[in-house]
Amino acid sequence: MRRAHRPIVAGALVSALTLSLAAAAAPAAAEPADPLAAFHRQEVEWAPCEERLLEGLECAWIEVPLDYADPGGERASIAISRHRATDPDRRRGILLTNPGGPGGSGRYMPIEPRPDLGFDYGLGDQRVAEVYDVIGMDPRGSGASTPYLDCGADMPLPPPRPADDEFSTVTRTAIAVQRSCESNHGDLIPFMTTADTARDMDVIRAALGEERTSYYGVSYGTYLGAVYGSLFPERLDRSVLDSSVLPDGMWRELFQTQKDGYRANVDRYTAWVAERHDVYGFGSTPEEVLATFDATGARLEDAPRDDVPGLPEDKLFTAGDFDFYVGMAARNQSVWDLVSIDLWYFVNDVPFPAVELPEPPDLEVEISNDSLLLAVSCEVEWPSRLSGYYADMRRAREYSPYGVGAFWDAPQPCTFASQDPVAPLVELERDGYAPGLVIAAEFDANTVYEGGPLMADRLGNALVTVTDEGGHGFYGIPGHDCVTAAVDAYLVDGADPRDATCAGLPRPEDVPRDALSAETAREEAGEVLAEVMSEREDPLPVHRPGHG
């Protein structure tokens, strides 16, 4: 972790009043030099973005100190993008954004929807883009920013319910990843912190000539926004924290809550599908449905499948993949009917129908960097006692072996970091800027609901609760008009932020008995399965356009 950052001020305040003639005649004290003046006053050179996904945006690079304790030393370059306010007469400044992670590269955030690239969401067609210059940013170490952090190894997602004899493999892998990361970029890791990214944001603000900035962040971006407001309260205007993390427990305790979120979603899905036993035949009670899934997983343990839609040619679909899919798919209540069709093929061990899936387009931009996730996670000290991890893994595999399962209970690379954090985390507070808005969904598994009320209470912000919803990231998402209206009323129209309750996407209710044989439904189900399983390789909690 980085060293403690000393507050920087533009100059000392000198009183114009004097108590005596002698005091008035005394020479004025010299104002201290601003060590970041050169960064704040740098000229920003905008040019059309060159990457395919970013067409229509402007791009630039902002120079920042790599080490804020040594502004005269090595520099980093932060890549940013801009969607100019479409109504200049109503322009009210910039809106900095972050998609989550840690590790999410965010220059795509200001785009307008690009259905041709599979991205049906972007802030560029939302009302905020009328009155703000929307700014996307690849945080230090990611995307087009330099220096780029590459550990040379990724932490693979292990089976959601690993057996005891797999614990040592998981541990050795974590050790190898951390050693590789420190070997490749041990000199950079201490500077890849949330606080340093927040400081970069303030340099961006100043370099763009803005007295203050507004902010919209999702997932980890909610923590980043809260840190920014704590460090630079006089510089933060309006702020929206969408799908808020817990304000405490960075990082292991926060990550461990995900298994509880996945289990809650599995519970509500199994109750729904049990009511439709005459359609799917999984069981007439949630307990029977879970027993059916466990039996299916056991069969896949012995005989993995190679016919699953979207599966790479050289990969088999395993019991671990099945557990992952059950947990991930259970979150999306609006497509539970399609999810159930996919699961029907697994449960009954029948071949999947052929489904032609389009080749993923070359977006020419990075969406997330797992190496940065590893580095930011090391901004706090992790427990070193392996027996504690193993005990947690055993509990997780029994209680919630779905979705990420026991992954976050296992030893992580940061468990074996050779460097101790050198500064405490920033204490979150709101002291000097106006109340903002926090959004939280009742069944969000990436950032569990409890984080919303706790963050809102910590910062004195208003809270928007999305009920009966397992999604992640809601502003501007189709179907979440209630959330979007609340955000627009605050960010665009200037209304005071208020507590509100919004309904999640509706569940499928009337599922026809012939749903399993409908060709269109089979194709859509195959697409859902392929999309969810793509996250098996990249489960970062990043708000991706087109993903609720």
Image (cartoon, rainbow, N blue to C red):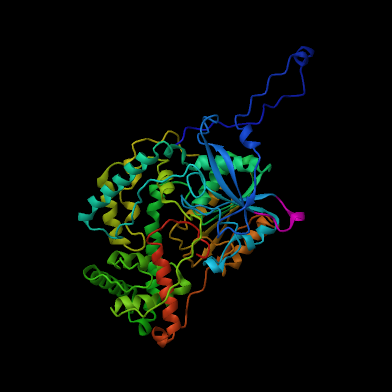
Q: Identify the residue shown where x is 36% and y is 77%.
A: 274
Q: Pick whichever, 21 or 412, lies toward us.
A: 412
Magenta-span inclusion, residue 365? no
Q: Is residue 91 magenta?
A: yes
Q: Farthest right residue?
A: 21
Residues in magenta, as a range: 83-92
Query: What residue is rendered at 67% in x and 28% in y?
Result: 11
Residue 232 location in percent, x, y? 60, 39
Q: Is residue 162 visible?
A: yes
Q: Is residue 404 left or right of residue 195?
A: left
Along the line of sight, the residue nearer the viewer: 33 or 119: 119
Tell me if residue 456 comes above or below residue 337 in the rendering: above
Q: On the rendered image, what quadrant is the N terminus found in?
A: top left
Q: Residue at x 66, y 58 (%)?
A: 129
Query: In the image, 496: left or right of 290?
Result: right
Residue name at image x 56 percent, y 53 percent: 107
Residue 479 at what x, y percent from top left? 56, 70
Residue sitting nearer the eye, 81 or 491:
81
Can residue 429 be seen from the camera position used here? no
As drawn, 86 above or below 33 = below
